Image (spheres, helix red, strand yellow):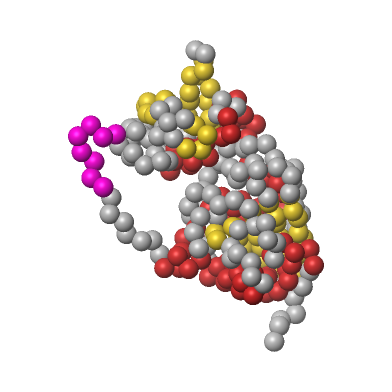
Amino acid sequence: MRRTLTSLILSAAALVPFLLSPTTASADLGGLDEQELAAIEEINEVRAALGLQTLQLSPILTDAAEWMAQDLANRDTIDHTDSLGRSMGERVSSFGYPSTAIKRENLVVGTNLDLGSEAVQQWQDSPGHKANNEASDVIVAGIARVHAPGTQWGWFWVLNLGSQADSGTTSVADLQQGPQQTQQPPISGDAPIGTAPGTFTIDFPSSGVGLTAWNGGTLAEMAEGARQGGAKAMFITVNGRWLGYNIGAQAFVNANFAAQFSGGNVPEGTVILVVM
């Protein structure tokens, strides 16, 4: 028996690419709760029945969803335009999601909307939201819910959907099984520290500044690697002057830094000054 819900829902889709915006952070997917995962599982059941690819969990989209759910709770409202005046596409891109990716978003708020199944039911009962859940052009998702007692709506849910997987994307099943132990190859001789893609050749200092080099990959991967290493900022030299990238800053702050890397790819061996 379905509970009577007092709720509002809103959906959006961005099918036009946005300008590249470097990542600010990557969410800890292990922080997703039981009901958030249940909602993704229920959407995946619907998609599987239609012969569609099931959704995996994207760290970047989850990060964007978590931010937006808290933003809606802070304002006690439902709106695809956030408190900074950004549209859905602009906001998701600002978290580092690929500029060429398709982006979709479902929102729902409600006083009794604590269960993932009820959030999904609300979306499935609305043609626009249903179309987003069942879109064939998306393969990953990020989801978040925030409970804000004392507000008009109480529960605030955000579902972000995208067409491109990012680093750290995983399935719901793998996430529920927990992290797998892997054997790390020994470092010996003159081999640089961290030779795999997405790492730096020299460990960051515990404080102050230090020089290292990037092993190759995207700017988003590099920024996230720097963040995980505890860096607050990165600098490169271009024609004798320093260009900075502030970890967590909005896209326009880091625009000059990002413009140096065509297509968002940072060549192997790029020397980076990190500020801790």
Q: Is residue 196 above or below residue 183?
A: above
Q: Residue at x 71, y 83 (%)?
A: 2
Q: Start and end of the magenta stretch?
A: 185-192
As for residue 37 lying within the magenta part, the answer is: no
Question: x and y percent of residue 133 in the render?
Answer: 69, 65
> Is 22 on the left or on the right of 28, as rendered?
right
Say which of 37 and 43 sits in front.
Answer: 43
Q: Is residue 153 above or below residue 62?
A: below
| Residue 38 in which image quadrant | bottom right
Q: Residue at x 58, y 34 (%)?
A: 263
Q: Residue at x 47, y 60 (%)?
A: 30
Q: Is residue 168 above or below residue 51?
A: above
Question: x and y percent of residue 99 in the render?
Answer: 64, 41
Question: Most prominent secondary structure in the magenta stretch?
Answer: loop
> Is 13 on the left or on the right of 212, as rendered?
right
Q: How many marks?
A: 0
Q: What is the quadrant of the C terminus in the image?
A: top left
| Residue 84 in which image quadrant | top right
Q: What is the quadrant of the N terminus in the image?
A: bottom right
Residue 116 in view: no
Hey, which residue is sitting farthest front in the picture?
51
Question: x and y percent of residue 217 in the render?
Answer: 47, 37
